[in-house]
Each structure stands twice: as structure tokens, then as C-alpha cells.
Amino acid sequence: MLQPGMRLRVPFGRTTVIAVLLAISDETDVPKSRLKRVSEVLDATPVLSQPLLKLLMWASSYYQHPVGEVINNALPALLRQGHTPEVKGEPAWQLTDDGRALDASVLEQIRRRAPRQAALLQLLSTAPGTAMPAPHIDAVQNNWRPVMNKLVDKGWVAVTKRARSLSLPVGGSTTAPQLNAAQAEAVAAIAEKLGSFGVHLVDGVTGSGKTEVYLALIESVLAQNQQVLVLVPEIGLTPQLVSRFQQRFAAPIAVLHSGLSDRERLRTWLMARSGEAAIVIGTRSAVFTPFARLGLMILDEEHDASFKQQEGFRYSARDVAVKRAHIESLPVVLGSATPSLETLHNAHQGRYSRSVLAKRAGVAQPPRIAVLDVRKQPMFDGLSTALINAVRRHLDSGGQVLVFLNRRGYAPAMLCHDCGWVAKCRRCDANMTLFNGNARLRCHHCGSERRADACCPDCQSRELRPVGAGTERLEAALKQQFPDTGIVRIDRDTTRRKGAMQSLLDSVHDGSKRILVGTQMLAKGHHFPDVTLVGIVDIDQGLFSADFRATERMAQLLVQVAGRAGRAEKPGQVLIQTHHPDHPLLQILLHEGYTAFAKAALEERQQTQLAPYSYMALLRAEAVDGQLPLQFLKHARQLAEQLGAAFGANFGESSVRLLGPIPAPMERRAGRIRAQLLLQASERAALHHLLEPWLQQLESDKLGRKVRWSIDVDPQEMF
């Protein structure tokens, strides 16, 4: 019997494609002679449940994106290709008799010489007599297969092929720590609402123990034989979170992120759908995962911009999670030390409940924060004398140091000292970033790359100098200042290989690296108990930007990075280098905290009628021809105005305002000229009332076929 949510193989032109049945009807406007029969029904039961289909249909309508692409986004690649929803013949690993016979002294030698081998042996020992499949090991350690092969070669581990099985060995169970009063109050308030819809904000300063609140709530949900979905913004956060969850819960845990193979992704997807995985930890797209008995969703670092998809289907995982919770009548927890202004506004309006964790857990104290005014001060590759001296003091005292700069590469520009020429991207309105390690110039916007010039192309001078600093230059400068100290750089360039991130973090935790240099990858959720100093090299770029969200993101990043200092018994210090120490929002943030900053920022947003006090959509257009994007957007504005007149809408003041079109802040990118038109409304319904018929007109418009255009509902970036 056909049911919505089943996959079908259907004829399409001269070929066949995989389709998903959305609804069944006895009537059609298409002549019966033009209808074609379904080639094959692929599923005996729906692969997508009715609540999940309802969510996907809503997302398609809300974000004005084709429903087929939205559903494709929710299905694993193998299911989109027509494969059966099962996984056969999965490899698994277990200790051999020799591996189980290793005594404590040998294991200690292995731990010292090969800590990753020791970690795998310890993991396999938690499941005696049971072969452990790849997903369980993936959840704990990245890039583990070469290490496991060494253990197999030594005869300590055996690999077998298991018959189809989706069960994962469970981890151990450790005793939960005693919650403090604020944590206990938050858990009680949210646990009371289990089984019904509600959005709960856990607003806790860094180190306040938000994760313990999550763990206590998960314990309650698992006790009711229900499942939990935990969303994190970055892949790099999943191994440490999984490890912590495994120590607490004797329950199967699965992970979902872009680093998995197609077969691994399908296996995890099926485990969640069958109910075998009690806890699923994933990144943005995991919000569409099917569950048998979903009882709770948690979004850690809910403010993070990574939860918004910026290409193709432009959805917000946070907002989709809230809608899913409403459809399925379950609670969703949003956690952050720096909640987004939209989330805080919803809490102030009473739409979300809010629990505040104002103090750090245990004996940890908040770090001392000071501003270093670097105006007129000598700088050494981006580092002031005061910051270098502070680094030396903390190293001498046995602490670790984190030096933060949210800019990769060696230098953000290369300049000719004789004539002023600057290395520009040939395809974008942007400077090329110098990567000194391989003498390359790279554009961070389009990805184009070329060898660094040996001499100036304008005046032939060889006086080419790097201008500004990136993480690569900071690393080199710190090595020069502290040649005998282990230094590790963590950014996108050093963590490209699978497992690289975990390997670098291990070197921090074992104490072999005492200075950490990195970008925002280090700001999110990491626990560095020995870091006593955080040096923030440059925050000025966040104080002045064409994007109205820039100051909010600067404040969030600053607070998150500062929170890495003094998380254990050792007191922490944060030093912030800036050329604008008197900036009013910076002063509020430093002296009164993020809550006061957010209040001031919300008042500013209200005065300017920007989100969350208005609802926005951004129509972007780009083309190789420099005239076409603006022509298309001017035409699009005329169509919108005509629709508005037909609906009786007033575009001047109240209903929907049209701002632009104007060139994009970065007008030329990847060889294409870009422009944008902003729609702003005081009511969400008014905006969506216009969008659907307007976009239908643009789809069939001749001018629209000459440009590449897209609509971004609730845009998080104005570029």
C-alpha cells in the first residue's frame, strides 16, 4: 500500500529518477494521457515519517526552496541513489587473547610511547568478547584506522566482518557530579516540561557547567526510553562531546557530520530511525534525522553562525529545531554563554523560558580581563611588548597560553614598499592572503591561489612586504620569542586531514605544547584546564563593519575565547589588544558583561528596526556581465511593488520595505559581479505573503534566466 514518505523510481524524460511520495490524490489537473506509471516502489514502509515530512514541507515553504532539494538534503546519499535502507557486512574489531593478556606495565609503556594505540586498546577493552564496529570508534577518535592496523599487525586486535547489525557497544557509566543550585534549578525547570513543546534557553557563562545540565536532562529522557538529538556547530566538537557522554551513559551513541562516508552516514541514520541509537550527536544537517522515539533536542552554542546554511538550501538548524519540537511536541534546549540577540529577545518576550548560570562551576573563577591600548606602541609581527611579557610570565608560572587571532595565513596583504602596489585577487574585490610556509597567495573568498610574486609587477622592486598578521605569522613570531617552548597552531589549514584536530588537541592536553595559536576553532566548547592566559591579538575588525551583526559576533567571540582561561583551579587572565579601547560597546562588554552588551545592542536594533525587531529576506543576484545583476534586481523590485499594490500593501512605511538594489559589499567575487535587494517587514506574515507569488514570477522571468539569483530568508550575513 502506497504511503507518503516512500521512495519511488519514476520515469523522467528518457531516464528514471528516485522520487519521494508526498501525498496521494484521486484527482489531477494533468490529462491522464500524459501521466506515466511509477517504475518501481522501493520501500515497503515510508523512509520519512509524517511529522518529518511535515517539517520538510514547512522548511520548503518558509525558506522558499524547492521541496525536492529540501527532501534530498534530509536523505543520506545512498538512499537518494535508490539503495536499500540497510547496511551489510560491516567490519568490526576486538581484542585477541594476546591483547587481553597485556599487563599493566606493558600498557603503561604503550601509553607513554603511543598514546593513540593505548586509547584504542582501552576502548576495545570496554566491550570484552564483542567486536566493535567503525561508527563506535569514529565517535571517539578520528583517523584511527592506521593506528588500528598497527595493533592488528602486532596481534593484539583482530578484525572481522559482522553480519548486518546496527547495534553499537555501549560505553561505561560514571557517577554524575553534584549539581550546584543554579544547575539543579535549570534541570528541574526543563525536566518538568518533558513530553510537551517548549523552548528553553540555558544562558550560562563559560565554565558554568552547561554540559552537566544537558547530561542530567539526557539521563531523565533515557530513563523514559526515549532518544536525544544533540546539535553542535563544528565537527571538531563531536569527539570530545561523545567521549564525555560515553563516560556517563551506558547507551549507544552515534554521530552524524560531513566527515562520514556515505555508508557510515546511512548506518547512523538507520540507527536513529530504528531507535537503536539512544543519543545522536551531529552538526547542522542532523536536525532532519528520523527518530523512533525522539524526546529531547539540545543545541549547544546556539548563537553560532555555523547553524545557518549559507549555500543552496539556506536554512537555520536552530529555527528548524524549534519548529520540529513544536510539530512533535517535545522540548528543545538552546545553550550558550553568549545567546544570540534573537534568542534573548524571544526570552524577554516570554516565548522561551530562560535559566541563568551566572557563576563558574566548582572553584573556577572568572578571568581578569584587561585592554592593551596598542596605539603608538611597538609591535612585533602583531604582538605588543606587554602581551609578549605576559606570555613569558605565565609560561614561567607553569601555565599554558592561548593566542587568538581570527585570521588565517601569514599576512592578510602583501605590499610593495616602493610604489604601494598590493597583491589583489584577480577574481574578487579582495586582497590576497600570503601563506609564507609555501610562498603562496590565496584568496579566502573564491579559493584562487598563485605563487607569491618575487618582485612588484608595477615597478619591478623586490621590496615586497607582508602587511598585518595571520595565525601563521603569529606562530613564527612566538617561535622566535620562545624557541624552547612547544607551540601548536590550530586553524583550518592545520586541521584539514581527518584526525588532525584531535591529534593537535591531544598535544595540548598532554602538556607537550604550551602555547596555542588559533582562530575561532579554539573558541567553541574546548576545555583547557592549564590555560591561564588568553591573548586576543586584534578585535578591531569586528567593531567596524557593513554587516549590522558584526558587533554582536565580535562580542560573542571575545567572550567565548576569554572563557578558555582559568577554567580549573588556576586563575586566568585575558589581554585584549586594540586600537579603539574607548569604543562604547566594547566598554560595556568589558565592564558590565555580555548581558549588558546585549541589552544595549537590542536597544540599538530596536531604534533602527533591524532583526529581531523586523523580518528580513535578501535577494542576491550575480552574473559575469556587470550590468545584469542590478538590472534584474531593479526589475524584481518593480514586480514586488506591483504585487504590493495589488495586495494593498504599503511599501513606504508599515508592511514590506524594499531597500536597494545596491552592489554587494564585495561586488566582485569569483569573477562574478554581485548585487542585492533587501526586503524588510515589521510582521513575518506580510513578508511571506509577498515572497511566494513574487518568487514564482521571478522563476519564469526572462531576465531572471540570465543571472544566478537566490533568496535568503532570515539572512545571517549581509555579504
Image: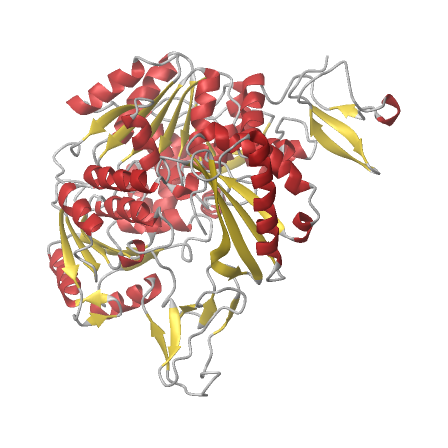
One can see residue 133 in this view: no
| Residue 405 in the image, given as x and y percentages of width and height | 30, 57
692 or 491, which lies in front?
A: 692
Query: Tell me, what colour scheme is on the image?
Result: secondary structure
| Residue 636 in the image, given as x and y percentages of width and height | 59, 45
Q: Is residue 203 left or right of residue 711?
A: left
Quadrant for residue 412, please give it.
bottom left
Q: Is residue 282 left or right of residue 192?
A: right
One can see residue 20 in this view: yes
Q: Determine the residue positioned at 72% across, 31% down.
A: 18
In the rendered image, the quadrant that contains the N terminus is top right
Residue positioned most to the bottom: 460
Q: How many marks?
A: 0
Q: Is residue 482 left or right of residue 150?
A: left
| Residue 719 in the image, given as x and y percentages of width and height | 45, 52
Residue positioned most to the right: 33
Q: Is residue 316 left or right of residue 223?
A: right
Q: Determine the residue positioned at 86% across, 27% down.
A: 34
Instruction: Note whether 479 is above or below 496 in the view shown.
Output: below
Q: Determine the residue positioned at 24% across, 59% down.
A: 537
350 or 417, which lies in front?
A: 350
Quadrant for residue 60, please give it.
top right
| Residue 450 in the image, given as x and y percentages of width and height | 51, 71
156 or 198, which lies in front?
A: 198
Instruction: Note whether 390 is above or below 156 in the view shown.
Output: below
